[in-house]
Image (cartoon, rainbow, N blue to C red):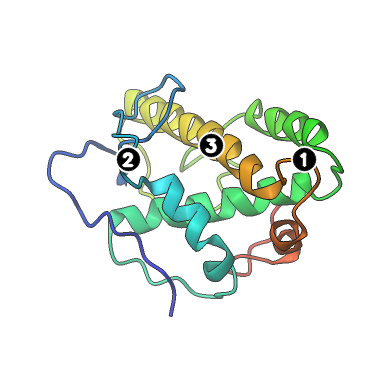
Amino acid sequence: MVYHSTFIDEEGITKACGCPLLPLKSHIRGPAPVSDQATTDIIDEAITFFRANVFFKNFDIQSPADKLLVYLTFYINVALKRLEGCRTLAEGTKAVINLGLEDVPVPGESGFPFPGLFPLPGSEEEAELLRNYLKQIREETSGRLLSVAYRPNGTPNKWWLAFAKRKFINTIAL
């Protein structure tokens, strides 16, 4: 059974293209509301559930937050593929920073990994809001992923990098 998000359609959460803009424990500027450091956010869930969810071929969406969890799981898979050849934390940080500098496609643009996951944006402002949120959440996820993909001494953690070979929902990460 796939692990679902615990953020079940909370009241007062802004949405862009059907994607909830959930609060993040982040120091990176962006449209996401700031969450309390003691609480679990969607990035914590994605990293925690990644190694289990990556084995599933199907993902039954039960809430809007599950859509974001699917997107983050795919992004973690892409990031791990980039980290696969990096033998030190410094090399891994450089690879992840380069990944973060890439353009972030939104639904309706070429390069968006799951065309049917989110509805198309109703306006250019909504598309930009989602693009900025996804950029912020990708940067924050990358930083947290480095802390689990590499040990404190800077060597790769093989128990995490081994999952770079997995395909999530039969989607090939580029």
| Residue 2 at x, y percent in the picture | 44, 74
Asked whether the residues under the numbered discs 2 and 1 touch, taking CB atoms below 8 Å apart as contact, a structural biologist would say no
171 to 27, vertically: above or below: below
| Residue 95 at x, y percent in the picture | 76, 34
Left or right: 86, with 3 as reference point = right
In percent of the image, x 47 and y 54: which residue is there?
A: 46
Quadrant position of residue 57? bottom right
Confirm whether residue 118 shows in the render.
yes
In percent of the image, x 87 and y 43: which residue is there?
A: 87
Element under disc 1: loop
Asked whether the residues under the numbered discs 2 and 3 touch, taking CB atoms below 8 Å apart as contact, a structural biologist would say no
- In depth, the one of 67 and 7 nearer the eye is 7
Amino acid type, mark 1: Asn
Q: Earlier in the sequence, mark 2 or mark 3?
A: 2
Closer mark to the observer between disc 2 and disc 3: 2
Q: Which residue is mark 3?
A: 138
Q: Earlier in the sequence, mark 1 or mark 3?
A: 3
* Disc 1: CA contacts within 10 A as few (<14), some (14-19) or many (>=20): few
Q: Which residue is mark 2?
A: 38
Left or right: 78, with 67 as reference point = right
Quadrant position of residue 143? top right
Amino acid type, mark 2: Ala
- In depth, the one of 60 and 34 nearer the eye is 34
Q: Which residue is mark 1?
A: 153
